[in-house]
Every structure is written in C-alpha cells, then in structure tokens.
Amino acid sequence: SSPLDKEQMQGLRGIREFLKVRTSYDVLPLSFRLVVLDNDLLIKKSLNILLQNGIVSAPLWDSRNSAFAGLLTSTDYINVIQYYCQFPEEIDQVDKFRLSSLREIERRIGVVPLETVSVHPMRPLYEACRRMLRTRARRIPLVDTDDETGRETVVSVITQYRILKFIAVNNEQHTMLLKKPVRDIGLGTYSSLATATMGSSVLDVIDLMVKHNISAVPIVDQNFKLLNVFEAVDVIPCIKGGAYEELASTVGDALSRRADDFGGIYICGEDDRLDSIFDTIRKSRVHRLVVVDDDSRLKGIISLSDILKYVLLFGEEEDDIRQVGTMI
Ligand code: ADP
C-alpha cells in the first residue's frame, strides 16, 4: 500500500485507540442541561417544549414506575404523521395522544419499534459507537443506576454528532493523517439518491425518508443543482399546534419556517478529504455533508453514520469485529 494508505490507517488506529480509553462520560460538557419529558404529556405539547428549548429529542420518564421510558425523536413525530395519514378520521384522537401512546401508534401503523439501547456512561466510548452502528441508533441515552435507590437515572444522551465532534476536537494529530479523498475511500452514498424539489409536498418527502430509512432528503432543481436539504427534524415545526393539513404544503414553504438560528447545510466535493471534513465538524454543527460537483450539482451524501462507520470499521479484521460484537 502507498504511504498515503499507511498514514490513513495510522490515523484511524489512533482514533480507535482514543475511543477505547475514553468513556461516554468524557464526552459530556462540564455543565449541561437535560430536558426530560414525562410520559403522560400530550404529544401536542411536547412539540412546543422541544421548539421552545431549541432541541430535537428528549428522554422520556415514566413517573408512575420511576423508570426511563425511551427516547423521543423526530421519528416518533413522523410515526404520528403516518398514523394521521392512515386514519384521517381519527384526527380528534391524534390531538389527545400522550407520549405513552407512541408504542401503540407504532403498532397500529405497523412499524417495527426501534430497539431501545442505552449505555452506562462509564463504559468505553468505543462500545457506545459500536452499539450505535449495530442498531443504527443516532442517539443513545446514558443510563446509570442510583446507588441509594437502585433506580435508573438518565444522565444524558450521546449522539453521533457529539462523538464525532469529540474526536475532531481531541484528535487533530490523528485526523490530520486522513488525507485520502472521499472518492477513493467510497465514503457516503452516490447512487439511488432520494431527492425532492421545492414544489414537492412535505408528505412526499416524509414518505421518502420512511421508505429509504434516511434522515434527510436533498432538494434539487430541474438540473439537479442542490438548493437545500429537508431534514427529519424539519417536520417538527410543520406540525406544531396540530396543523396536520399543512403537511400538504410544499417543501419550500416548510423550509421557510426554519428557526432563525438554523446552522445551514454543509457541502463538500469528491476530492475533499476526511481531514478537512473533521475540520468542519470541529468548527460547526454538521449533521451531514452533501457532495456536489463544481456546478453545484448533487453527487452524493455523506451522513454522520457513514463517517462513524468508516472511522471505526475500515480495515478491521472480520475476527476482531465478531469478537467485539459478542462483547457488546
Ligand atoms: P444518519 O444515520 O447519520 O442519521 P441517514 O439516516 O441520513 O444518516 O443515512 C443513512 C444512510 O443512507 C447513509 O449511508 C447515507 O449515506 C444514506 N443516505 C442518506 N441520505 C440519503 C438520500 N437522500 N438518498 C440515498 N441515500 C441516503
């Protein structure tokens, strides 16, 4: 292999070693706020709370049993929307749903519930990453047990973004070795891309996300030039106040409802390298990169899970993977 390959592998090994000696707890800031929602809360009200707090997900708490009750994410709202589409005559009912009904909604629309995984905050970060990749969970609650009461407590939630940010900030000596262009390492998805246009309805885009099991759809013009990206979290303001009929409106309208502090979308080219992608992650709140050519035409998409998978698994011996698999 070339010197470039050797360096790349050396960088990846460095990051993996780092993830093995750090814990999920290390990723948490010194002081942070955690919004936990009571399972008895109306789904309708939960939307406002997320929007008011500028967050897109929250752990749920079952106060009757004093137990952690799962994680509320934009997928749950997409499920509620699917329910509304399948049973439009039950709109009055939909308004009365509580967060505790989410599992029932999943059952009625026939989606397989996501496996609820959690990790102990003091376990190696590497383990949390492997578990994320195995279950395709984009965020994992850190659950600890209270020494005195023996009850579960949710310490925080760890996301793919936070982990990659943590790597970017603490591993510059390793990320700077990742000099192979994304084209050469096959990072991301470049075929069968799911796309929509500004005139598509929000419901159509939600349909695409559900069918392809993806969290974002690039919005392009008739020449396939990239105009924007519709993200799963963009559905939250769309259904605020129970205005489900607005889902028939266009993507263009929906995107104009984004919060003022929306961070923007991030693009890169096929010649860009992971070292520069990590620079971007270090500086900004990146949730995915859209790959475009020199004429801003859409070429592909690099998700955070694509990056995490590459960083953890590329070049790993099958045996090692199996070994870790049984450990986790
Ligand atoms: P993440 O798991 O980081 O939230 P996604 O769910 O969006 O990211 O992506 C899951 C997989 O699907 C990734 O391999 C990604 O490259 C691919 N992907 C993401 N968006 C699209 C899209 N619009 N069309 C086709 N594939 C996509």
Image (spheres, rainbow, N blue to C red):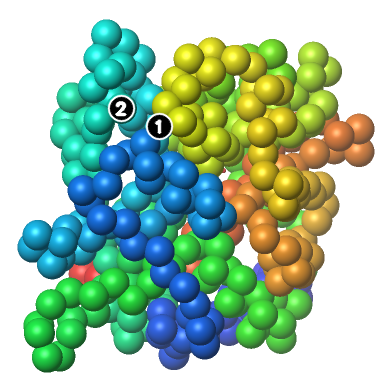
**In this orientation, which residue lies closer to the viewer: 46 or 81?**
46
| Label number found at residue 58 | none
Residue 312 visible in the picture: yes
Cβ atoms at labels 2 and 1 below 8 Å apart: no
Q: Quadrant of the N terminus?
A: bottom right
Q: Which of the 4 quarters of the picture holds residue 238?
A: top right
- Answer left or right for 288 relative to 324: right
Circle 1 packing at 10 Å, graded few (<14), some (14-19), many (20+), is many
Mark 2 or 1: in front is 2
Q: Which residue is at the far top?
A: 89
The residue beneath circle 1 is 78
Which quadrant is home to the C terminus? Answer: bottom left
Q: CA distance from mark 2 to mark 1?
A: 15 Å
- Residue 67, percent across and down? 15, 65
Q: Residue 95 got which mark? A: 2
The answer to whether the beta carbon of the residue marked 2 is less than 8 Å from any atom of ligand 1 is: no
Q: Mark 2 or 1 closer to N-term?
A: 1
Work out whether residue 185 or residue 110 is closer to the camera in this orientation and state it. 110
Q: Residue furthest right?
A: 295
Residue at 33% in and 81% down: 121
Identify whether 272 is placed above or below 83. Answer: below
**Badge 2 amino acid:** Asp
Is residue 222 positioned above or below 129 on the image? above
